Every structure is written in structure tokens, then in C-alpha cells.
Amino acid sequence: MKVLKPLYPYIRRYRWSISIGILFVLMANALGPVVPALLGDAVNAAEKRQLSSDELWLYASLLVCVAALAGCFRFLMRRVLIDVSRDVEFDVRNDFFEKLQGMDPAFFDDNNTGDLMSRATNDMDLLRMLIGPAVMYSANTIFGLPLTMVWMLALDWKLTLMAMVPLLGLPPLVKFFGARTHLASKAQQDSFGEMTTMVQENLAGIRVVKAYRQERAEEGKFRERNEVYIRHSLALARLQSMFFPSIRLLVGLGYVILLLVGGRQVMTGDLEVGTLLSFLLLFGMMVWPLIAAGWVINLIQRGMASLQRIEKILGSESMVKEPSGPARILPARGVDIRAMGLQFSYPGTTTPQLADINLDIPAGKTIGIVGPVGAGKSTLVHLLGRFYPVERGMLYVGGIDINDWPALELRKRIAFVFQETFLFSDSIGWNIRFGTSENAADEAVREAARRAQVHPDIAGFPKAYDTVLGERGVNLSGGQKQRVSIARALLRDAEILVLDDSLSAVDTHTEEAILRELKDAMAGRTTFLISHRISTVAMADEIVVIEEGRITERGTHEELIAQGGLYATLHRKQQTEAAIEQEDFDGEARA
Amino acid sequence: MSTTAEKFQRDRLERYREEERESLQKQGDLKQTTRLVKYLAPRRHLVGLCIAMSIAVALLTPLPMLIIMYSIDHYIMKGNYHGLFAMAGWLLLAEILIFAVDRTNTVVIARIGQETMRDLRMELFRHIQRQSLRFFDRNPVGRLITRLTSDVNALNELFSQGVVGIFQQVFSLIVIAGVLTYYNAWLALYLVPVLPLIALASWNFRNNVFHSYRLTRVRLSRMNTFMQENITGMRTVQANARERPQFSIFRGLNDANREAHLQTVFQYALFFPVIEVISALGLGIILWRGGMMYLSPEASTTLTVGTLALFVQALERFFQPIKDLSEKYNVVQSAIASSERLFALLDTKPAVEDPAEPVAVAPLAHSIEFRDVWFAYNDEQWVLKGVSFRVEKGQTAAIVGPTGSGKTTLMSLLCRFYDIQKGAILIDGVDIREMRQEDLRKKIAIVLQDVFLFYGTIAENVRLGETTINDARIEEVCRETGFDQFVRRFPKGYATGVRERGATLSTGQKQLLSFARALAFDPEILVLDEATANIDTESEEQLRRAVAKLCDGRTSLVIAHRLSTIQRAHKILVIHHGHLAEEGNHEELLAKGGLYRKLYDLQYREQGMGTGELGTVREGGAVGRIEAR
């Protein structure tokens, strides 16, 4: 029951609805046995010829009324209890989403999208079943069985007990099949998994398969897995094919006893024939709650496992802690950034990603960062956005330790353009406004797009800024996406601008145009330019070269060229590269 | 005057409504489903057995009730205990018979379903294997897996629950109705007014549930897509401080999803009790009219207690199939959608097909030739624009050029992974499109940059599925490529398990394994994409020797990243922007001072000087920036 603890706050919210729902279950079940009893009474009276046609009419209409009332209660019980489960699902899902929004990138590295989505879908479904159907059917069984039995016992306790004897076989039957079904279905799922893995591997390696003509061998492999899966599926089907007929057979034995013993009692006059009829009907009513019990146990077990998986996410904490204690007065626009011996390693690792970084960036200056892949360039700006935890005393923004900045306040001041751009499946206009407010004026949006050199592209779509992106809409090229993200950042008018290798997919010509436009935007803004291309960072006030997490060179473009280090080497290579790009050669003429 | 935010909200809702309208208009096409019959044909005996069993189940269902009726009227009411005893025996026998038939039938249905699915799955797999790479470029792995797994399973549901289930239920409805009419036609006639009520309730339920079911599907998937998108783009959301607005959109989607589900809940909550009440109405009618008959003094319309009991019990059974049938409607609907997708996949023709009359393939005699080859992955975006060259038997051609110039494409085309749009690729003067793909690929071994390892042992990864390659041969090729020295370090040797992204082997070792693989297949033509990845010096030297060994005496096409490879090549082909820019040997091209000279300065010269600074060079260089996948 401890497992269920995370559910209490949700359940509490709906405790009245749940109580009322359970009350409806009780009412419906209380009325259930009345119908067979009425029927039996009527038959008994008719048998003794003590029934007028008016009384008969009364019996019949009473029967229909009771059934209608029971029906109403059944409708209400489903309505109330299942609705509650949908409401709880709604609440849990909202909390789940909100929790994800507060998590740091390391969390998303540990929990991949597929896994999180499976918790939000499959596990959420099972959790809902735990709250809705499981509760409803357990209540049904808990009230239904005893109430029916009480009626039967009241009619004739000896006959009841005798008819129940075969049902004693039920618990061992459930236990026997339960254990085996569990094993068989696990084997079936495993073999299914193996088959899927094999297909996945085949598809991922299809080039090798084709190049080495392994299609037939792969078919053989697949056939094997397919056969194993079918074998396990059939084994499971065979087991299941025994279970329900066996329950039916036990109940059938009960009928045999009822017929034999009850019939004898009718002959001796101990039992009226109408009562025997009631017995037959009541006995039939016990079957469903019994079968449901087995099903409910399964639901509860799976639901609890899913609850744990969801709770694991709901219970996780972001490693980036919001500042505690009294709120600080945050500085006005125009903050400087200072790193003092900044050191950082990704959570769970020991190798330092950044070491001994010292930077002093006055407000409004532009800093260029160059270096090999994985040197720590992006990490540096991620720390600035409080995406990862930083030790105290190492990084200051506007003279305040970064740990004392509420993440949201800090990020409002920074416009990021990341290396991997991300756009949502909504209209382009909406995506550009993503960083500010949806109410930004159309004119401002167009201006930002113009400066990011993407306006002509957008204007070329039939629906221009209302063009919807994504699966059901238009797909932009890598370069277009980058330019839209730049427009998004430009519209934000934030005091710090971070361009993290965000021009990699645009051609050199467009890059130059964007950089020209950016010059204006960068005036009065602190700008971080991270790039592989020297041409991008050349105009920065200060350029640092980061290698293996350390600053190895720093200075202006001219100073670094003069130093003749990595920066100078890269510069030379890229110039040659650019020359090759523009090369005209004989091939063109021949074609 | 509305704000922009309101406009976005409005546009979004309009898009959603459009989606919902679309999904509601889509009707399942039963025509595709009839193709399922083809797969049942090989099991027609089992299908016949299944039909017989289903009829038997329906016929046996009323048997216990009939025995009880007979017992009441003929023995209990007449005080014949001895006869009752016999009847109880019959009842027991009937129950056992039902148990046996029911059980056998379930097993038979499962067998038909599962075996049919096995065949269908096999056919799908075979069909997918025959597709060209263009197909795999367009269909993500996940989608194909869904076709092979969930969609096939949905079809099984369609068969076992849908076709067989519906047949059984309808048949048992008919049998019960027949039995009631036989024993008391008048009383049965009184039940007729109930039938339109049931029909109305079921019809209404079916329509409403169909509507809300489709609605839930659309809304659920929309909500999940939004969540998935937000998880993927969470950093963007956080960096733009958009958590609150995004949450409120999500909340709206979540709410719409709940609302649609509550509609479905309402339909079910209403339908079950309504059927129960209608059933009670029938019971009331039987009690009233049956009672009147029982009490009636006329012998012609008389009714026995036993018949009354029969009617009461049969009524319960009569309504069960109706509940089941209505519930199955959704299962059938989604299975039809699955079958449409499945058969559409089966109808996709492979883009690359074998010729009707393939030429007999002889061993390579003189050359490989590309003659004015034009190729585009997407319709007019030419990747190769009229490339022509010739490689003589036994020679090595090195292909060099900047990223994206079309080098890898050349290799895929030689293997006929794609068909070219213009020109011809010839082996000994024969167009490769005139050969069977299998014969063509038998001549060629291709080694890709990204080494793909299958889950299995090292030996299995060298041999793949080729049983003719024995252990001795595997050891031999591993020795020749120098891979054996690493294998010997593993306690299990060649039986060491590897997996796709496992860390058992280093990048260099994986390369060596793929070389051994190529060597084991002993091809006439070698197509090699040299790895650019950072490799330790020990493996580097190994690789150099292995490449030399591989190319030795073979006709080879190598995308070269190593100076040593280029220097050894008989011919260098410089590819740039989809053209053959320069052709010649190392010295000639260096002397020419053209594009090759520049590429050499940029990429290869430092290898020759032995700086070993490959990583840093690649970083800024043309090769590294995009190719680093």
C-alpha cells in the first residue's frame, strides 16, 4: 500500500466523488438479486394458483422498475468512477508535463524521449485503469458476491452451501493458471521483443545486408524468431483456452448439484419450484464477479508498477536549484559577466569539461569563442543560462553569483540560438514570436526575419508567416531553420545574445549578410559568438580559443593571427577551403 | 480588434477542427480486408474445423437450459427422482461437452490466427528486404517495425475477434431465437416488440461511439505529439522562458483529450444499463404473458414452469452477444485501418528490380566503367552530373573530393542500391541493370565508413549468414587483416559477443573486422570508404596494412582519407560538385597544381609530415565539419 502513497493527494481531491460512486455500486448490487427473487415469488404464487392477473401485472412491472432503478445506479457508478479516473489522469499528466519543464538537460540525457513518452502514455493508461475500472470492479465484486450469497442463504442455506462446493475449486484454479499464464505471457513478450530487435537490427544494417546479399539469410533468422514467437503465443492461447471454460465447468457442476438437490427438495415439498428458479438465476449472477476478481488483481499489479514508474519522474529533482532565502534585487539592464576560475564537469563524470576559465566581459561587448568539437565551447554558454549547476563563486552576472539568479529571470535576459535549432509544429509567425510574446506586432516579426535573411524564403510560401511547420505542414531546410531561430532571438531584444554555432548550415554568402545585420543588433548587447568559422568571430572585441576545456589563446583577431597558434592555422585552412568552394574547373565546361 | 495571440489560438483551433473533421470522414475500406482470405487458404481444413466448431458451440449453448426445462416439467414436477438423477447426469455431460468444444475451438482459432500472421509477417519481411535503399530513405525504421508488429497483430484481432467472433455471436442469436420459437411461439412472439428497442440502442451506441472513438484517437495523438515535441525541444522552451505559455497549451490539449474520452465513457455507461433494462423489460413481458398463459384454463395455450425457466435463462444469453458485438466494433474499425496500411506496403513495388532476362555473369575480365552517369536522390537535384571514368581490372582507383561532392553516391550506384537516371554503369561492357542484383553484388564487397555490427559473435559478424565460410577461413582472413591479434586478447576469442553500439571493440577494431568480413567474401571488386574517425596510432598502422592487403590484386574503388592509400592508387579521381574534376596519378595531379593540389595541401600533406594532428585538422577542414556524424 506504500506504493499507492503518491496517489493520495490526487485521490483526496475526488474523495467525495469516489465515495458517492462506491455508494452507487452498493445500491446497484443491492437491487441486483431482487429481480430473480421477484420472479421466483411470482412463480411460486402462480404454482399455488394464488395469483390474479392484476397481481401478475404488478409483479412484472415491479420487476421492470427494479431493473430500471438498478440500471440507473449502474449508469451513475460508471459515470462517476470512470470520470474520476479520467480526472486523475488529467491531473497527473499535467503535473508530469510541468515536472519535465523544470528539469535540467542532464535529466533528458538520462531519460530519453521514448522512455518518457512511454511513461506518459502506457503507464498513464495503466494508472488510470488502477483508479477507474479496478476500483469499480473490485467494489462490484466486494458488494455483489456477499449480497447475492446472503439472498441465497436466506432462501435456503443448505442448498446454497452445497451448490457452492464446486466453487471451492476456484482459488486453486486461479492460482494454477495465474502463475502459468504469467510465465507464458512473459515468454511470449520476450520472444516478441527478440523478433522486434532482430527486425530493428536488420533495418538499421540494411546496407550491409544488401551489399553482402544476406537477404535470404536474414529471412531465415526472421523465420526462426517468428516461429518461436508463434510457439509461445500458441502456448499462451492454449493456457487461456483452458481457463474460462474451466471456470464455466465449475459453475456448471454447481448447476448439476442445484438441479439434483434442489429438484429433490421440490419433490419432497421442502422447496417451491419458483424458489429453485430464483436459485438458478442467482447462481448465474455470481459468475461474473468471480471472473472479474482475477482480472482486477492483474489490473492492480500492473497499475502499481506503472505508478512507480511515473512517480520516479514526478519525484525527480532538477540539479539546478532555484535560489532560496529572500529574493535579491536584480540589477537593471546592462549586466557584465565574469567567470573566475570557472570549473565544471558534467554531473556523474569526473573529467572536467571546463577548467580554470577566467573571463571578464563588460556589458555590450562581443566575445568570440573558437575551438575543436567537444572542447567545451557550448558548455560555457549552457552554464550561463543555468542549464547545469555551477559551484558558488565561479560565475557572476551583473555582480550577482549565478546561483542567486532565478533561472527564469536570468533566461529572460538572454536570447539563445543553439547549434541544433528547434522549431515547433506551429506557424512560422508563432515560432518567431516564441521568445517574446504572441502579441508581438507583425511588422516587428517581419523586420526580425528580414535581418536574419529569412524573410524572402517565408514570403515565398503561399501562406507566408501563417505557414505551418512540421509533419502536417512545410519542412524547412537546415539553413532556413537556423535563420528562423536567429529571427526569433533578434525579436527578443534581450540584453545578452548567444549564437552557438548557429550559422553552420547557411552558406558563406548568407552568413556574411547576417553578420552585417547582426552588427547593428549587437550594438549595446553583450554577444557570445561561438563558431568553427574564423570568419564568424573575426569581428569580436575579444576572441578566446578553448581546447580541452581550457583557454589556450586569447586576443583580437589580429593579435591571434600574429600569435601563429591554432587560431592562425584554422584561419589559413579555411581560406583555402573557401577558395576550393568557389573553384571553377574544367568539369563544369564539359557538362 | 483582436490581438495576435488570439489569432494564433484561433488558427490552431481551426487546424484541430480540420484534423477532426478529416478523421471522422475517413471510413474503413473493407475491400483491403478481403485480401486476408488469401492467407486463410493454406489452412482451409482448420478453417473448416473452426466453422464446424463455432456452429457446435452455438448449438450446444441452449442445451443445459433445455435439460433443466425438461427436468422440471417431466421429473421434478412429477416426483420422479430416478429420472432426475439421469437428467443431472445428462447436464454434467452437456457441460463437459461444452467445455471440450469451447476449448478446442479457442485453440483452433488461435492457431489459424497465429499461423496466418506468421505467413503475413514473413511475406512482409521478404517484401521489405527486396526494396531498394530509396525505400529505406523514405520509411523510418520505427514505421516499418510498427507494420510488422502491431499492425499484423491488429489484423489477428480482426480475424479472431471480428470475423470469427461476429459469426459465432450471430449464429448463437439465431439458435436461441429458434429454440424459443420452437417451444412456445406465442410467448416468443410477445418478445418481438423488444427487438426494435435493442436495434435502436445498438445503432445509436455504434454511431456515437464511432464518433467519440475517432475523436479520442485524434486528440490523444495530438496531445502526445505536443508532449513529445516539447520534450525534444525542452531546452528551447527553457531558454526562451516559455514554460508557462507552453504548459497552458498542453493543459488545453489534455482537457480536450479528457473531454473526448468522457464522451466515450458516457456512451458505454449508458449503453450497458440500457441493454440490461431492455432485457428486464423482456423478462417482465415473459413473466406477465407467460404467467397469464400458465394461469389460463385453456390447454391449447398452456405453459409449463420448465418453459418459463427456459425463457428466463435464454433471455440472459440472448443479450450477451448484443453487448459483445457492439463492443467489438472499435476493434474491427482500428484493425481495418491497420490492414489498409499493411496491404499498401505490400503493394509498393521495389524501385530497383531484376531484369526479366538477366545476362549470365562471367568473372571480371577487363574493366568497370561509369559512362556519363547522372543521378539525383530527389527529382531534379543532381548529385552526379555526367560522371565518366574507367577502372581497369586489378587496379585501385582513389576517389577524393570535398564533402558532399558525391563520392559515397558513386559507390552506392556501383552496387545498384539506387538506379541512375541517365547514362550507364558497365562491368566488362555489360550494363549492371541487365544483371541480377544478386550476381552483381556477389562480385563486389563494400566496406562502409560506419561499421555496422550485428548482435552476435565476432565470427558471426565476419561470416554473416554465409554458411560456406568456415571457422578456419574466418581465422585466416582475420590473420591477414591483423584483426586476429585483438581477437586473441578476448577470453572467448571468436565467440566473443558484440553488439551494434557496444563498447567491446574500438573504432579501429571495428574497421578491421569489416575488412576481414570483406576479405572472407573474396570479392572481385572492392568498394571501400576509408574511415576518417580518430584512430590510435597502433590501429592506424594496422589499418594501412590491411587496406593494402585488401586492394592487392583486386579491382578497387576507394574513397581515400589516407595519404598512403592515395599514393598507392593507380588512378586518382577528383570529384567536385558532382563532376569529375581531375583524373590522373598522384604525381601528375600534384604537378598540375589544380584542385587536387589544394585538397592535398588541406587534408593530406600533414599526414605525410607525420604530425598526427588529424583530429584538429579535420575540425576546421572541409572533410570534418559535416561528415562528423
Image: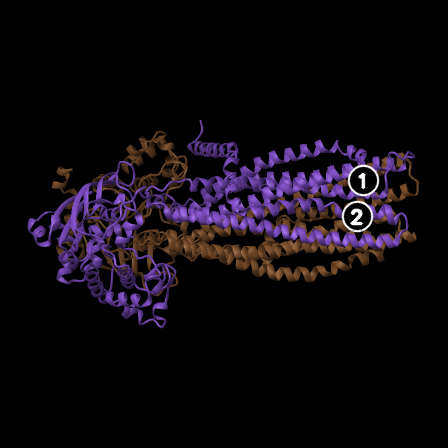
Chain colours: A brown, B purple
* Left or right: residue A536 compared with residue B584: right
Question: What is the three-letter code of the residue carrying label 2?
Answer: Ile
Q: Is B73 positioned to the left or the right of A75 in the image?
A: right
Count up the numbered dots: 2
- Residue behind mark 2: B67
Q: Identify the secondary structure beneath mark 1.
A: helix
Image quadrant where one finds the N terminus of chain B: top left
Q: Position of residue A303 (x, y in %)?
A: 58, 54
| Mark-to-mark CA distance, 2 and 1 | 26 Å
Q: Which residue is mark 1?
A: A63
| Residue A578 seen in this snapshot | no
**Label 2 Cα crowd, 10 Å radius (few <14 / some 14-19 / many 20+):** some
Residue A457 in sight from this viewpoint: yes
Select label 2 or label 1 by which is in front: 2
Q: Residue furthest left?
A: B591
Out of B55 and A270, give the one closest to the viewer. Answer: B55
- Identify the amino acid type marked 1: Leu
Local SS, label 2: helix
Please say if B483 is above or below A278.
Answer: below
The foreground one among A392 and B103 is B103
**Res B563 quadrant in image:** bottom left
Q: Residues within 10 Å of mark 1 (few under 14, many from 20)?
A: many
Label 2 resides on the chain identified as B
Q: Can you give x and y, in whole percent of width and height, for residue A311 in the image?
A: 53, 56
